[in-house]
Amino acid sequence: MNQEIGFLILFALLEFGVPIYVVWASYSEKCRLDLKTLWVHQGRIDKLAVIIMLTWWTHTSSIILWTFLQRVTTTDYMTYMGWAIPIIASMFSPTSPPPTNPPA
């Protein structure tokens, strides 16, 4: 029971502490971490981006908690991969357009 309480405290720190720190660090002049591009579009906060990010972060924290509590199943990991694959693919996609004339 004590171990479960510890994991729940860790979950609460992950769920609320990390997003608060990321937002603070993005707007603070003391820290060089700037992730505003994730939730700002044309100078305004993008509500859909915020919803998607918070949903993804909740899912990430839940997977970590379930893993610690040994209640996670293969289906949970597969569902999480549904989030991870498009994000990783967009991170590694080329930023420049492909050449118009391929070499002969």
Image (spheres, grey):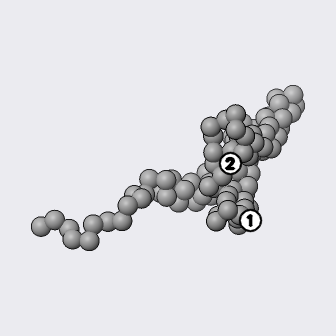
Give the mark count.
2
Q: Which residue type does callout 1 highlight?
A: Lys
Kindly indicate the quadrant of the structure image that contains residue 67. top right
Could you tell me which quadrant the C terminus lies in?
A: bottom left
Kindly indicate the quadrant of the structure image that contains residue 38. bottom right
- Front-most of residues 66 and 28: 28
Q: Horizontal and vertical percent for residue 97?
A: 36, 65
Q: Is residue 51 above or below residue 68?
A: below
Toward the bottom, the furthest residue is 100
Q: Is residue 37 visible?
A: yes
Q: Which residue type does callout 2 highlight?
A: Thr
Q: Is residue 42 above or below residue 78?
A: below
Task: Provide the residue designation for mark 1.
Answer: 47
Q: Is residue 85 left or right of residue 68?
A: left
What secondary structure is marked by label 1?
helix
Q: Horizontal and vertical percent for residue 59?
A: 71, 52
Name which of mark 2 and mark 1 comes first in the sequence: 1
Q: Residue at coordinates 67% horizontally, 35% vertically from top-left? A: 31
Q: Is residue 103 left or right of residue 34?
A: left
Task: Provide the residue designation for mark 2.
Answer: 60
What secondary structure is marked by label 2?
helix
